[in-house]
Image (spheres, rainbow, N blue to C red):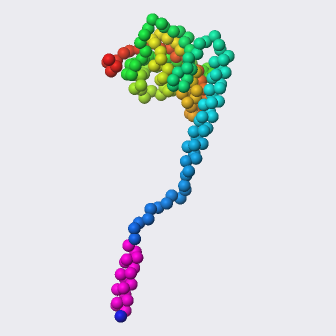
Amino acid sequence: MSRNVFIALSILFTILSCKNPEARRPIQNNSGSFMSNSIERNKSIFEKEKLQIIQLLNSNKEQPYHSSESGFWYYYNIKDTTQTKTPEFGDHVTFSYNVNRLNGTAVLSKKEIGIQNCSIDKTNQELISGIRDGLKLMKQGETITFLFPSFKAFGYYGIDNKLETNIPVQCTVTLNKINQTHENY
């Protein structure tokens, strides 16, 4: 009889031990509030910077500022009305620029930065997105001053020992040369 009890208990334990595996549950449950808070914080930063830029625009009425679709403002220091070509995808451009705070204090000079070369929309060069977008608006020989909110400039990173995080800047860019490539024919 002990043999029958042993067999019955073995079958019972075998049946009870064969259950489906359970999924492990996370220790912490995130509600997504970090992303919501980050979005609100970035909107607040942009509104503050936009207010600073608008104050600068209002204090400098003699310059006819333009607003770009990319979220920055600019005016022409030197405008060439005889040229018609702006850089297109793949074109190689040569340019120089400087970086100033909105009050005009120099952060990086043209001499420090030097002459820059890049291909439009195909570069891994560490250019701020504002300059990449601004070059597409320029013609050869033009000089434009751009006012960039921090998200189009150096944003969260800033520049070590020169520019803090989330600071809007103005950059004066001179487009020296456009070399058209066969990619955009």
x and y percent of residue 88 in the render?
40, 19
Q: Residue at x 50, y 14 (%)?
A: 174
Q: Is residue 110 visible?
A: no
x and y percent of residue 157 in the render?
56, 33
Q: Is residue 173 visible?
A: yes
Of all residues, the one furthest to the bottom in this rendering is: 1
Q: How many marks?
A: 0
- Is residue 3 found inside the magenta-colored segment of the image? yes
- Is residue 146 found inside the magenta-colored segment of the image? no
Q: Residue at x 36, y 81 (%)?
A: 11
Q: In the picture shown, does residue 114 fall above or below 44?
A: above
Residue 152 found in image quarter:
top right
Q: Residue at x 51, y 58 (%)?
A: 26
- The quadrant in which the C terminus is found is top left
Q: Nearer the viewer, residue 53 or 144?
A: 53
Q: Residue at x 37, y 22 (%)?
A: 90
Residue 41 found in image quarter:
top right
Residue 44 found in image quarter:
top right
- The boundaries of the magenta stretch are 2-18
| Left or right side of 146 for 138 | left
Q: Nearer the viewer, residue 157 or 7?
A: 7
Magenta stretch prevailing secondary structure: helix
x and y percent of residue 85 in the render?
41, 12
- The quadrant in which the N terminus is found is bottom left
x and y percent of residue 120 in the render?
41, 22
| Left or right side of 141 for 34 | right
